[in-house]
Image (spheres, rainbow, N blue to C red):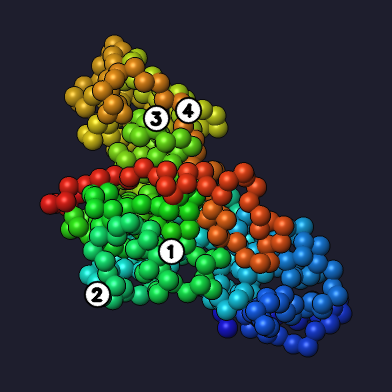
Amino acid sequence: MSQLQKALLTASLLFLGLNGCGGTGGQEAPMASTRQGVALAPPPPPGCLPESPDTDQDGICDGVEAILGTHPDSSDTDGDRLSDYAEAYGLDGVDLPSLGANPRRKDLFVEVDYYPGFLPAQTTLDRVISAFTTAPVSNPDGSTGVSLHLMVDEQISAADADQDLDPVWTEFDLIKAKYFEASRAPFFHYMLLANQHSGGTASGSSRGIPGHDFVVTLGFAGGGTALQLAGTLMHELGHNIGLRHGGNDNAHFKPNYLSIMNNEYQLHGFTMGGVPNVLDYSRVRIASFNEATINEVAAFTPVAPTTEADLALIGGLRFNNRLVIGNASANLSFNANFVIEATSYALDLNHNGAKNNVFPASQNDWQALVYDGAGEIGDSQLGALRSLSRESAFLVAPDKMEPCLTVEPDRTP
């Protein structure tokens, strides 16, 4: 029994004694049962009787919700598309509490399977986990950040490790069907570390935006460094949770979009507060930017609530695949000549051959994440919240996905 489950059991028994809710004792990670293929409601947790009031119909009675600190009017208090019941007690054989789930703090679970020789180092995974831990995302328990659980599961056998997934999702599904437990599907995204896909040199792909599945394919290029692998993993996961190459648009190499979703930064990260190679989604909003009138002294303009002080913390910026001096707030050498130009000039920053593109304002990615996995993430105890609130499951359908960053096949990216 996990520490969280012990605490829940103790609190529930105390509630029984004080309020007379009834019950016959504790239970560990209750699970839904089935009879003749029909799913039954999971058993009420300790402290609840079947007739106890349950306003949000999530399986936890209002009295126990008060003890847990969850919201009796919402089956998903923290808004991560995992029900309070599943995060507090486990569901359908998946023991989320023992894996660290918290109904009052956002959790994101990813199963990681890998080809022979592609086992990721924990330190590599920790770079991505740390980015989520320190994210500017508020939670009902008063904490900030998202708890990212990158659960390394198993190695794909050599016989199943197709060296070129082509067609990517047809071949991917053969592996997923064999190695990914169906019971995890409402709770976990599925990631595969593979060699190559679609006969090309793309670093990876997400199965739509948002999505449930993604593949990282740096094997054919030597696997990449720890930073490059971590950046690519976070980039593809970003697509799974609703981010495009321009954040809320698909503008490639958008100069005023400071996120590893921008391919300029996928393999490099940023310098944040003087610390180099930090992986991050955009945490600032920047005004629209015209590459025909670049002002190096002024750099970018913040959009409230972002401030100039926020922009000044962000360095290690890159344009046209070149590292430049300065920060996002001022004295930024867009043309990489290491001189701050006093007069405005034009420069092609998105590699399309023109110098007059106007890029719309960029978003704060962390405030725009989508946790539903195109409708595949979300369990039975969400009730009405199980349904998607948008017209289509996808913001970008899988067959409309553009290739992610391409790399040279004969060398590490």
Q: Is residue 390 left or right of residue 361?
A: right
Rendered location of residue 323, percent (x, y): 23, 35
Q: Say which residue appears at 32% left-offset and 41% top-offset.
A: 263
Q: Residues within 10 Å of mark 3 (few under 14, many from 20)?
A: many
Q: Nearer the viewer, residue 176 or 336?
A: 176
- Amino acid at dot 3: Asn
**How far apart in space, not on screen, are marks 4 and 3 (Cα)?**
7 Å
Residue of label 3: 256
Q: Earlier in the sequence, mark 2 or mark 1?
A: 2
Q: Mark 3 or mark 1: which is in front?
A: 1
Rendered location of residue 71, percent (x, y): 73, 59
Q: Say which residue appears at 59% left-offset and 66% top-offset.
A: 102
User: Judging from the image, what secondary structure is the residue with disc 3 in?
Assistant: loop
Give the numbered dot on residue 190. 1
**How far apart in space, not on screen, are marks 3 and 2 (Cα)?**
43 Å
Q: Say which residue appears at 24% left-offset and 31% top-offset.
A: 320
**Residue 399 in view here:** yes
Residue of label 4: 361
Badge 4 vs badge 3, beta-carbon distance below 8 Å: yes
Q: Earlier in the sequence, mark 3 or mark 1?
A: 1
Q: Nearer the viewer, residue 402 or 354?
A: 402
263 over 309 or under it: above or below: below
Q: Mark 4 or mark 1: which is in front?
A: 1
Q: Earlier in the sequence, mark 4 or mark 2?
A: 2
Among all residues in the image, which is located at the extreme left?
Answer: 410
User: Judging from the image, what secondary structure is the residue with disc 4 in?
Assistant: loop
Rendered location of residue 309, percent (x, y): 45, 32
Among all residues in the image, which is located at the extreme top?
Answer: 343
- Amino acid at dot 4: Ala
Image quadrant where one finds the N terminus: bottom right
